[in-house]
Image (cartoon, helix red, strand yellow):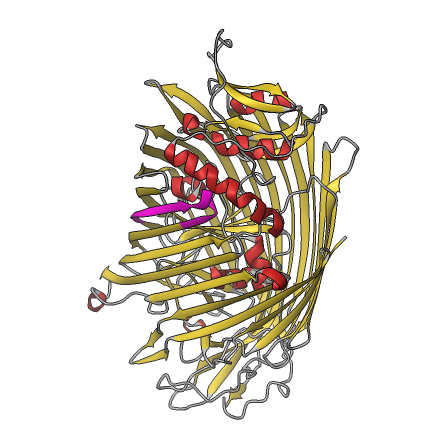
Amino acid sequence: MSLHQQVRTMPLAIASMLAMLAGAPVHATPPAAAPASAQSYAIAAGKLGDTLADYAASAGVPLSFDPAQLAGLRSAGLRGSYTIQAGFAQLLAGSGYAAIESGNGAYALRKIGVAALPDGTQTLPGIAVTASADNGTVTEGSGSYTTRSMSTASKFVLSARETPQSVSVVTRQQIDDRGFQSLDDVALDATGMSTRQIGGGERTQFFARGFEVNNFMADGVPIAFDQDTMGLASMAMYDRVEILRGASGIMTGTGNPSGTINLVRKHPTTQPQVLMNVSAGSWNNYRGELDAGGPLNPSGSVRGRTVLAVQDADTFKKAYRHERKLAYGTLDIDLAPGTLLSVGGYYSREDNPGADWNGLPTRRDGSFYPFARSARMTPDWAYWNKQNSSVFAELEHQLGGGWSTRLTARALQTKMDMLGTYLYPLEDSELFGQGAGAYAYKKTQVSLDAYASGPFQLFGRTHELLAGASYRRNRDNDGPGGWPSDYNVIVDPLTWNSSTVPKPVMDYVWSRKGAQKQSSAYATARFSVSDPLTAMLGARIDSYDYSMHLTAGEWHDHSAYEVRHKVTPYAGLVYAIDGAHSAYASWSGVFQPQNYQDAGGALLDPLTGTNAEAGIKGEYFGGALTASTALFQINQKNLPLQLPQSQCRPEVAACYLQTGEVRSRGAEFELAGALAPDWQVMAGYTYNTAIYLHDSDAGKAGTRYDMLTPRHLLKLSTSYRLPGAFQQWKLGGSLRTRSDMRYPVGDVTVRQGGYTVLDLMASYQASPRLSFQLNVYNVFDKYYYQAIGSTQDNNHFGAPVNALLSAKMAF
């Protein structure tokens, strides 16, 4: 929806909201248009009133109804080609209402019996509702920093206020306003999220609520995220990133309580569009994107979309570059009324010459060297390259009576090829020795997911049920890998020259073969206990098989385990305090098999624990603005803590220490969306502290766990379009503040103090089809470490002040 349209429809939206709260009928008349032929629709499941409003807006017809009469009713949504009457019939199936044409192309709702329209039924006092033409979840074109609904928490398409967990979204508008290029960038704005670099900028870890986020989804289907091989350096193909904070056992079957990141791709558009975005920035950062889509046949029943992106950039680190390419294509095909097939795939390549595997060291006492931010301790010949390819197919079918099914199949292959070095301390010396390694990884995964959902009647009330099954198979075919037999390099951090080190000859003696299988069945029900109270109960049953064979010359190691019929329970309550606020509470079990290895190469035991949270949520201006506050507690056993590379066997690429039981507690607050029609905001604050309850090292009990997680984390992003004669201008900014982080190494501690970083943005709409945007990051050129590690590695600077100038064109 354009900014002008937002302003025009705001009075209507406010009137609709007041009518819903007060129960008063309101009348408004949008322009009427009633095409007789079938059209293609993509209306998300959700509240019946919302889906009807979306459908009426998409169809271009006025619709009169009293939203209060539809309270508590939901719809399974609408996908496919329908005439207007058929679309209304599908949306209203089982609701007890029908849409009756009242003349001049307008429609009104009438109460009916389940079987037939009774004589004498009167038209309800009406409110003509118009809404944006998107389906309530798509954020592209909305201009908003929030979304009306999402499904990451439970597969039910719910508003944030209906979801008994903490959920956030980084929308397409926010991604564009901030000039974000990668998922790392997106995490900068996401409430409660922090990142760490392990082995340079090509291996990012994401954290929330004190623990690593390793549950990822693509369009709501779990995928195995591998930080070594998976390329997420371009957001060009995604509509939004949905983030669940807290356990996600119902969705993934491996209920890590930190959170889940759901990458939601762009779909074909119902109208033709061609978009182009070119940008140039600091350090020779050049990028181009082409996004084209629309109907491919006269009826619009086949729609396509293609996204191409390319980036060529230096970085602020010496001899470190990015050469990145992305190609994405997808088709939406209406096979029949109520049946939609979506197919597509993508290919990405990320070449990163000069990648810094090690990061920077510190002095032996944990203090930082006075490095320039361009410094590196890895030779210039290092690299870390990735290739990803994926294909997918999704089939949705409306069964009638509000029930629908969805079947998804996805295959993903990720590859990595790297050469790099790492440091290790020399005894009684400020100098370091340097080791080298080269590895090639190839990983494949295939996933299937099928479920059905819809309403059912019990004790005179309407409830919802969702049930399904999934299967996932992952294979690791890693190797060759190895290290040089003769590489004796001594590094003095103060005089090191990364350009003078000869490239070693590698002995490729290492390989790793692994396989994982997970079979699952799950079910969730939303019970309408009373008008204000909704209960959500669910469970997931998983069986899991894992095996790995590691070879290094004459050395071999084989690890395997299986889990059968592990149940992950979930329970949640939502109580509607009034028309704008809800209180909620939820609890979930935690279970996650691990493929991390200890220093000797053995697998760690599965994670177990519990996750509980409670809070209050608000929804204002018809859902244009959302707010939430939450308290949470997580108990977890057998957590992995990464060790310095020098403590691992040479054959183990990364090793971890298994800790005891940890408790994480905290509070969160978030405000997202429109404070006014032209003013968007995303604000989030997180307080979090985690301690050891007990550990094999008795001295750790009661001490702080993982001091790299900030206790205080504040994020604020906003944009404002100027009024009147200056309405072509939009100004914005972002502020990130975090408390200190620490990494204990024996008797010393590496510490980065708290810091604040400010970014600014200005854009100018030169014409309806051309705009320019300037982003300036780290405006005050704050000198800080974005990530810290040990005294020998994994300390990485945040970027100095830099800028990005973009031009966006629509054809």
Image label count: 0
Check the image and name the residue furthest to the top.
119
Check the image and name the residue furthest to the bottom.
495
83 to the left or right of 752: right
**Where in the figure is residue 293, as x and y percent of width and height?**
73, 45
Q: Visible in this render: residue 601?
A: yes
**Where in the figure is residue 549, as x and y percent of width and height?**
50, 54
Q: Which residues are magenta?
A: 609-626
Q: Visible in this render: residue 197?
A: no
Quarter residue 39 falls in:
top right
Q: Nearer the viewer, residue 598 or 707?
A: 707
312 to the left or right of 374: right
**Where in the figure is residue 657, as x and y percent of width and height?**
35, 64
399 to the left or right of 538: right
Residue at horizontal 50%, vertical 80%? 780
795 to the left or right of 509: left
Q: Nearer the viewer, residue 478 or 637?
A: 637
